[in-house]
Amino acid sequence: MKLFNTFLNDESGAVTVDWVVLTAAIVGLGIAVLTSVGGGTTTLADNVSSSLAGTAVSTETSF
């Protein structure tokens, strides 16, 4: 019973668990942000592409 109580009171790995949970939360948040922003950036790139495709480029130079 003493060994079990010693195991329950040992907190040497608690900081490691905290950092693992914090890192997992940050990674999850990053994935969520990339997923939500990804569609918007694709739409924006398509809009810029179509706008540039319809623009005439002047090659005249005057000195």
Image: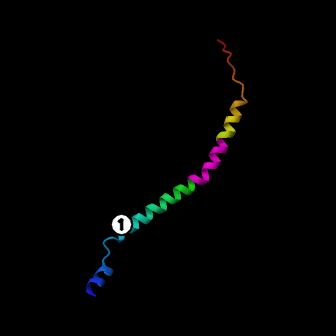
Above or below: residue 17 compared with residue 51: below
Locate residue 23: give its quadrant: bottom left
Amino acid at the residue labelled 1: Thr
Q: Position of residue 38 (x, y in %)?
A: 60, 49
Above or below: residue 55 compared with residue 3: above
Circle 1 crowding by C-alpha within 10 Å: few under 14, some 14–19, many from 20: few
Above or below: residue 57 compared with residue 23: above
Q: Quadrant of the C terminus?
A: top right
Asked whether 53 or 63 is in front, the reply is 53
The colour scheme is rainbow
Per the rendered image, the range of residues in magenta is 34-44
The residue depicted at 67 percent of the width and 35 percent of the height is 49
The residue depicted at 64 percent of the width and 44 percent of the height is 42
In screen coordinates, is 60 left or right of 20? right
The residue depicted at 68 percent of the width and 32 percent of the height is 52
Above or below: residue 63 compared with residue 8: above
Judged from this view, the residue extending furthest toward the left is: 2
Main SS, magenta residues = helix
Q: Quadrant of the N terminus?
A: bottom left
- Residue named by callout 1: 16
Judged from this view, the residue extending furthest toward the top is: 63
Q: Is residue 40 magenta?
A: yes
The residue depicted at 40 percent of the width and 68 percent of the height is 18
Q: Position of residue 11 (x, y in %)?
A: 32, 75
